[in-house]
Image: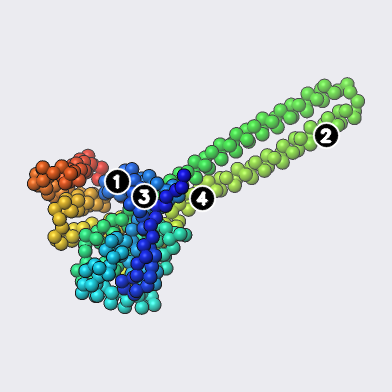
Amino acid sequence: MKKVSSLKYYKVKCPVCGTPNEFKGIKPKAYVETGRDTDFCPLARDWQDSKHRIKNPLLFLMATCKRCFFTHELNKDLIEWKNHPEFRSPAFVTLKRKHLEEFKQKNGIIKRMSKSLRPCKDPFSTAVIKFLLGIYDESLKPAPSYYNLGRYYLRVGWIFREERKKEESAWIKENLTHQSLGETLKSIQVQHADYLKKMKKLKEEVQFEFESETKSIKDRSDFLIDHIIKELNTLKGSLDQLQHIHQDYQNKPLANMGNDLFRFEDFLFALKMQWHEIPINEKEALELSLANYKKSLTQGLKENQKIRISYLIGELSRRIGDLNSAKEYLDLAINVGQDFIQKNEDDPLKTALAQRILEMAYQQKEVISRGRERVL
């Protein structure tokens, strides 16, 4: 049966520099999410195309120009940008001018960030950088969408979380392998000691058995048994060396766990000195998402968006330990949600998501009341 690829290719000219690009995107229904965290982060995915199982779809959510590194969410607006008013607006003209000015800077933030774009070799850091480039371009607008900035930072936090979990899972798996190896070595050493003991006993029995035989038979028997014992002693030395190697290596996974992540965090920290809106870990990404989501409440969100954003502000506040804000915004989500459901009680499809968010808001308030305050 022929496998269907999960990827779709879009040919788009960059609206900033005019360079032709071919962007990879995820096909609709290419995977099914099999669970979500309390901040809506997917917990697992079931892919139609098994070769993409280990990939994070967020790697393909943003499209980055291969020449000037202008970055925008890969959606219909970008694909058909020539017909979209956003790309003809004075705000986009301002963005374009500022982006190209920064791009021309030899040590500018755009060129520095772009050095970490390696989608095949390092999809994790590439996904983060693509979002940061998109965030940077959105922030160049005279009136940026705080809603989009909140969404993008939240997804950066998810990428960090997924990478951390992957590192932890790899360490656990490797640690279990080391435990199994240690048990096997111990078993061989025990068997070796028992075998050596039996050979020494055999020598005594042979000497007794051949006591009345000619000297040549006794000498030949003693020689062979002594040779075996000598080889066993040599084997014991090799087993001891192997045990030392295993002990030296046993702590290596723990020492090396997250080295790639730490190196990337160092890279982000250096960038942060130039542009302060760069998060270097999940917690900082969630804090920046939270700050932008709060600002988005003043930008005329739709009522159903306000329910979701109020809930997210409450949940993200809980995750970073700001419990007073968490309770305040979870209550806001409940109040707005109840009003929305009451107004649209005749349309269960329209109110289904609001009802689910209400349930989650009540659950997270219960989590706070039970004293399970922080996730991070």
Residue wearing tag 1 = 37
Residue 138: quarter of image: bottom left
Tell me how far mark 3 sits from mark 1, CA to CA.
20 Å
Residue positioned 75% across, 38% down in the render = 230
Residue 301: quarter of image: bottom left
Q: Please state which of the two labelled residues, at mark 3 or mark 2, is closer to the viewer.
A: 3
Q: Secondary structure at mark 1?
A: loop
Q: Secondary structure at mark 3?
A: loop
Residue wearing tag 3 = 30
Which kind of residue does numbered mark 3 sit on?
Answer: Ala
| Percent x, y of residue 42 | 32, 48
Which kind of residue does numbered mark 4 sit on?
Answer: Lys
| Percent x, y of residue 136 | 29, 67
| Percent x, y of residue 351 | 16, 45
Tell me how far mark 4 sits from mark 2, CA to CA.
44 Å
Could you tell me if the residues under marks 3 and 2 are in contact, i.e. CB atoms within 8 Å? no
